[in-house]
Image (cartoon, rainbow, N blue to C red):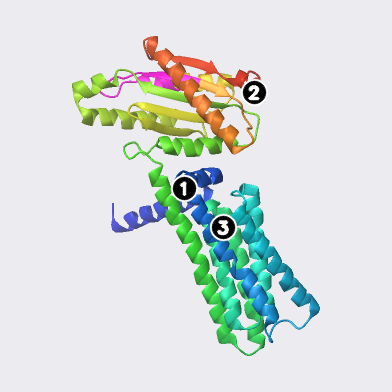
């Protein structure tokens, strides 16, 4: 491959990486629970509240400044924003962590209040300091929400900077206007850059280094996104465990065993249903979560069993597969998490039943009755 081809391939890889980042969903509750499990949620809430205190301070200082708004409406708006900002801070400090909808409302309120305060504030310096608060909001969005929402926030920030800079052109100060716009352009690169780096690190953390499939933690993260997709199609989990894999390691060595695991991962990816999540839970155990009707799930399980039973050069392995299927269209994070755990437990039990039958077989366990869902007629 010549140098130009290498550069072209590298550019393609970079573009694909950016596309994957843009399309990747964010499990808001998973991020929150990860912080909570490390007792870090309280610290984050305090930090967010402290950042939010800047808005009421700027509002009050603007109202009391001789150069502040000289109309009753302008002063009233600033006092209202100061009061709302205090409520915003109190909500972060004294109430539980917001759900995803509340978080979106708080982001929108923060963006609007900061921009309005900047519009009513006198002077280039005060406006510039106020605009930095939009960067802080962007950092929050980058940590807890999707790239698409961050793009909306970034567009709002840039539009606000332009609106604030236009009067400076009319006042004969184009240099200050240009500084404000260019400064905000530079600042808006920070949040997407942080989110992209965070996404790369998170993706690496949730991946299995040998097979590049999702790890157990990655499976838990992405499976909740699959379950949360709207629609009546049931959720199914397939657990596959290679039969007598220890014999492969003892006979051919661990290097050959690793090759078998990599080949198994490739076959699972190739034969797995569309839009499914494929992972290696550990050792020779793999899991797949998908949205399928019961007949389609059984067909998929049999197709995967046959694919894994095909010879791998001089080595032949088979797999015991357990399939569980249950309720779809679950509302609420805790119910979603419970469903995933129940499906994994039932699929694991079915997989061990398949092993007890000699391996290279599929056992199905339907847990829909636990939730009152009939999967037989699902499409």
For discs 3 and 1, the disc positioned in front in the rendered view: 1
Contact (Cβ within 8 Å) of mark 2 with mark 1: no
- Identify the residue at the far right of this view: 72
Q: Which of the 4 image quadrants contains residue 162? A: bottom right
Answer with mark 3 or mark 1, whichever residue precedes in sequence.
1
Contact (Cβ within 8 Å) of mark 3 with mark 1: no
> Viewer-proximal residue, 326 or 95?
95
| Residue 150 - label | 3
Please report the residue visible at 62 percent of the width from the left and 18 percent of the height from the top. 369
- The crowd level at tag 1 (other Cα within 10 Å; few <14, some 14-19, many 20+) is few
Q: Label 3, secondary structure: give it.
A: helix
Q: Which of the 4 image quadrants contains residue 357? A: top left
Task: Say whether residue 283 is left or right of residue 153.
Answer: left
Residue 61 shown in magenta: no
Answer with mark 2 or mark 1, whichever residue precedes in sequence.
1
Per the rendered image, the range of residues in magenta is 304-323
Q: Position of residue 17 (x, y in %)?
A: 44, 51
- Identify the residue at the far front of this view: 94
> Viewer-proximal residue, 52 or 201?
52
Please report the residue visible at 41 percent of the width from the left and 23 percent of the height from the top. 240
Answer with mark 2 or mark 3, whichever residue precedes in sequence.
3
| Residue 378 - label | 2
- Specify the quadrant that holds the C terminus: top right
The residues tagged by marks 3 and 1 sit, at their Cα atoms, a distance apart of 26 Å
Return the residue at label 1.
39
């Amino acid at each position: 491959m010549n140098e130009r081809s290498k550069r072209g391939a590298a550019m393609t890889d970079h573009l694909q990486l950016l596309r994957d980042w843009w399309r990747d969903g964010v499990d808001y509750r998973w991020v929150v629970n990860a912080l909570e499990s490390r007792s870090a949620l309280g610290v984050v809430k305090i930090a967010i509240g402290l950042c939010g205190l800047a808005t009421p301070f700027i509002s009050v200082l603007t109202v009391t400044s001789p150069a502040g708004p000289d109309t009753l409406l302008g002063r009233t708006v600033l006092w209202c924003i100061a009061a709302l900002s205090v409520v915003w801070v109190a909500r972060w400090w004294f109430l539980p962590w917001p759900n995803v909808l509340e978080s979106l409302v708080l982001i929108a309120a923060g963006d609007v209040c900061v921009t309005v305060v900047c519009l009513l504030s006198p002077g280039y310096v005060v406006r510039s300091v106020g605009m930095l608060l939009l960067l802080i909001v962007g950092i929050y969005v980058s940590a807890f929400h999707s790239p698409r929402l961050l793009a909306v926030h970034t567009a709002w920030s840039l539009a606000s900077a332009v609106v604030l800079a236009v009067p400076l052109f009319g006042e004969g100060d184009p240099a200050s206007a240009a500084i404000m716009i260019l400064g905000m352009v530079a600042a808006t690169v920070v949040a997407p850059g942080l989110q992209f780096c965070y996404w790369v690190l998170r993706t690496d953390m949730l991946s299995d280094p040998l097979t590049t499939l999702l790890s157990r933690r990655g499976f838990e993260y992405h499976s909740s996104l699959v379950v949360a997709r709207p629609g009546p199609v049931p959720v199914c989990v397939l657990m596959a465990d290679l039969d007598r894999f220890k014999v492969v390691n003892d006979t051919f060595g661990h290097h050959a065993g690793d090759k078998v695991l990599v080949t198994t991962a490739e076959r699972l990816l190739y034969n797995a249903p569309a839009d499914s999540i494929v992972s290696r839970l550990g050792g020779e155990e793999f899991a797949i979560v998908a949205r399928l009707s019961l007949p389609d799930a059984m067909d998929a399980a049999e197709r995967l069993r046959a694919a894994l039973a095909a010879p791998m050069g001089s080595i032949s392995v088979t797999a015991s597969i357990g399939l569980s299927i249950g309720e779809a269209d679950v509302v609420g994070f805790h119910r979603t998490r419970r469903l995933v755990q129940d499906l994994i437990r039932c699929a694991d039990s079915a997989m061990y039943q398949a092993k007890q039958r000699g391996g290279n077989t599929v056992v199905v366990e339907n847990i829909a009755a636990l939730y009152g869902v009939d999967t037989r007629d699902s499409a």
